[in-house]
Image (cartoon, rainbow, N blue to C red):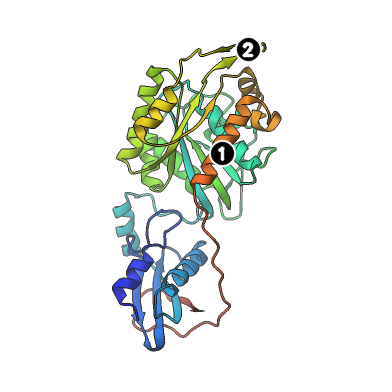
Amino acid sequence: MPTKDQVTEALRAVIDPELRRSIVDLGMVRSIELREGGKVEVVVSLTTAGCPIRNHFQQAVAANVAALDGVTEVGVGFDVLSDEEKGRLQEALGRPGGLPEGALAAVKNIICIASGKGGVGKSTMTANLAAALQAEGHSAGALDADVYGYSIPRMLGVDERPDVNGERKIIPPVNAAGIKVMSIGFFLESNAAVVWRGPMLHKAIQQFLEDVAWDELDYLLLDLPPGTGDVSMTLAQLLPQARVIVVTTPQPAAQSVARRAADMAAKVDLELLGVIENMSGFTTPSGERFTIFGEGGGQLLADELDVPLLGKVPLAEDLREHADTGTPLVLADPDAPASVAIRQVACGVAAMIPRALPVMQAETPTAPALAGISGTELPVVQVQS
């Protein structure tokens, strides 16, 4: 039989899909009991009785504990954190506004598209990369976290106000390709300016993440604003396991500023996936190529950061035209050079992020109540190994 410490270590692999941290680190493991015959009983504390990610915890706990030598049966029970316990968890996580309630539970990967400076085509890359991932068979969403310079709705061809479902969650509009989209632009008059201070930005981003019915998505792409300020720190706090892609142009001035965005990611412990070099060169209809913004800056930055150069996207008029009309080039003309480059980035991103295999769950009867457990008791599921 494993020891309680060994069971605890196994449970560190169970990650809360919204808080992006281990249930052990979050203090959600209420108890571990070792019984005769190789049976292990684990009780996990949920934030709410109707927690929409309860099934995720149930399967993950059962799978990780059952993998230990000597375990023949796993009982997974649930109770609910008290108000005092939830308050302590909110304080520890720096979330005075409350804990998430399931909106991001089914989003598998969150990728922030950052640049450090404006004008490098970050929003264009976000929109087209989302479209490329969708075209490759992955469900994708795009969140316009650039609250001041929102442009994702226009680039993805969405112009409608979102609805609200019966659970008071915002339903993100879906573009013609099936990409879910959310932006502050949906709630403002056309081209209205946003004049907000930092705390208002924090609240808006948190609401877009946690009060939107994202449902199941393979990838949620966040178009970050230029710089390394309030929004970046908010995302690091709310999404500690998000990944970052840095967009730069080849010129040294853009490269050095993009390096700051990468430094920001490192300081807040966000994983850097790689670099996209945009506007890498312009080719005339006759085939002559001009390196208007220089050459090789993306590779130099990638080498400095020790991450891959995910792609070099050429400066192309049709890429800009389709962004303005809301029909991403990767869908409108998949064979265009810029489209090919962006689709290669999408394939590289998908290859770099491992997919978790689903865990099969056996149908079992409800077990008797576990003794000595405080809180609101929920049914226990038995899993035979």
Residue toward you, 269 or 161: 269
Query: Dot 1: within a 10 Å radius of its alpha carbon, few (fewer than 14), some, or many (20 or more) residues?
Result: many
User: Residue 83, percent across and down?
Assistant: 35, 63
State the quadrant of the N terminus. bottom left
**Callout 1 amino acid:** Ala
- Could one spot residue 245 in this view of the protein? no
Residue toward you, 40 or 376: 40
Residue shown at 35% from the left, 50% from the top: 95
**Residue tagged 2:** 284
Looking at the picture, does residue 152 appear above or below residue 359?
above
User: Residue 302, percent across and down?
Assistant: 40, 31
Residue shown at 46% from the left, 56% from the top: 17
User: In terms of secondary structure, where does tag 2 sit?
Assistant: loop
CA gap, disc 2 and disc 1: 26 Å
Question: Could you tell which of marks 2 and 1 lies nearer the N-terminus?
Answer: 2
User: In terms of secondary structure, where does tag 1 sit?
Assistant: helix
Looking at the picture, does residue 201 appear above or below residue 216?
above
**Callout 2 amino acid:** Thr
**Residue tagged 1:** 346
**Quarter where residue 78 is shown:** bottom left
Q: Is 71 placed left or right of 330 in the picture?
A: left
